[in-house]
């Protein structure tokens, strides 16, 4: 079965959240306890009370999505990735749903979601593997990674760099070998027989609100 690229999946999911027939259900979120932050970091995250507070951060990496009963946003604060969840009423969800996707959409959506109170904040940086853990993937095949939930969303064949996501994050994976020629990219056919040479962390993936 052909495997679609994760970037296309992210675009479809985003379009569904904004312009479909109903809001998707709230995804399962990480609830593992976070380590005690430093006093400086604790002061910063404790100031986050509303969705508007997260928007005011002007984070270089920011994602948000409306689900049937929650608004979820992911942001970077003081070098730590967080996911914040705010309860969303049916009325506000319907108002978001009714917005026209035009030049005023962002401002009107921001007005609706900014007052939402944050119910919980999760430390996503707990999920980032150490480089030593990533190095343990060297020698594995592309098929093994795909079977374990990694998804490919792009590549650069001249350097054999492939861009993969796992959970909320994205990674650059360099493979050894030569991919089979073909006009259509298929993750299993292309990556399956290749061997991992190196893996490095790249940042926030395209659908971090979903994991």
Image (tube, helix red, strand yellow):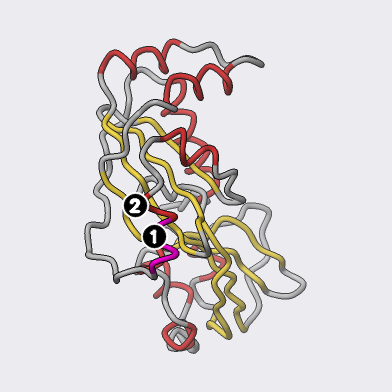
Asked whether the residues under the numbered discs 1 and 2 touch, taking CB atoms below 8 Å apart as contact, a structural biologist would say yes
Give me the residue at 49% from left, 83% from top. 131
Where's residue 153, x and y in %? Answer: 56, 55
Determine the image quadrant of residue 13.
Answer: top left
Give me the residue at 27% from left, 51% from top. 29
Q: Give the range drawn in magenta.
A: 39-43
Q: Is residue 50 above or below residue 48?
A: above
Side (left or right) of 61 relative to 161: left
Q: How far apart are marks 1 and 2 (CA)?
A: 6 Å
Secondary structure type for disc 1: loop
Q: In this view, does 177 lie above or below 39?
A: below
Give the class, few, some or many, for how many residues have Cα within 10 Å of label 1's Cα (few <14, many ≥20). Answer: some
Q: Does the magenta stretch include residue 183?
A: no
Where's residue 116, x and y in %? Answer: 35, 28
Where's residue 21, x and y in %? Answer: 36, 17
Give me the residue at 58% from left, 67% from top. 202
Secondary structure type for disc 2: loop
Where's residue 31, x and y in %? Answer: 22, 57
Mark drawn on residue 167: 1
Nearest the eye: 60 or 145: 60
Nearest the eye: 5 or 98: 98
Q: Does the magenta stretch include residue 42?
A: yes
Q: Earlier in the sequence, mark 1 or mark 2?
A: 1
Residue at label 2? 211
């Amino acid at each position: 079965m052909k495997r679609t690229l994760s970037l296309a999946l992210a675009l479809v999911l985003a379009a569904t959240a904004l312009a479909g027939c109903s809001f998707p259900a709230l995804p399962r979120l990480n609830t593992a306890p976070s380590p005690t932050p430093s006093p400086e970091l604790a002061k910063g995250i404790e100031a986050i009370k509303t969705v508007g507070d997260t928007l005011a951060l002007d984070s270089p990496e920011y994602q948000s999505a409306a689900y049937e009963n929650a608004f979820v946003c992911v942001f970077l604060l003081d070098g730590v990735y967080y996911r914040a969840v705010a309860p969303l009423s049916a009325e506000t969800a319907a108002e978001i749903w009714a917005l026209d996707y035009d030049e005023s959409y962002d401002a009107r959506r921001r007005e609706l979601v900014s007052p939402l109170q944050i119910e919980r904040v999760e430390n996503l940086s707990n999920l980032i593997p150490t480089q030593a853990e990533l190095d343990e993937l060297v020698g594995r095949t592309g098929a093994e990674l795909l079977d374990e939930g990694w998804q490919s969303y792009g590549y650069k064949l001249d350097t054999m760099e492939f861009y993969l996501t796992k959970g909320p994050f994205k990674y650059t994976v360099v493979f050894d070998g030569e991919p089979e020629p073909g006009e259509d990219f298929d993750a299993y056919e292309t990556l399956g027989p290749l061997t991992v040479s190196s893996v490095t962390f790249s940042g926030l993936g395209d659908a971090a609100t979903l994991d």
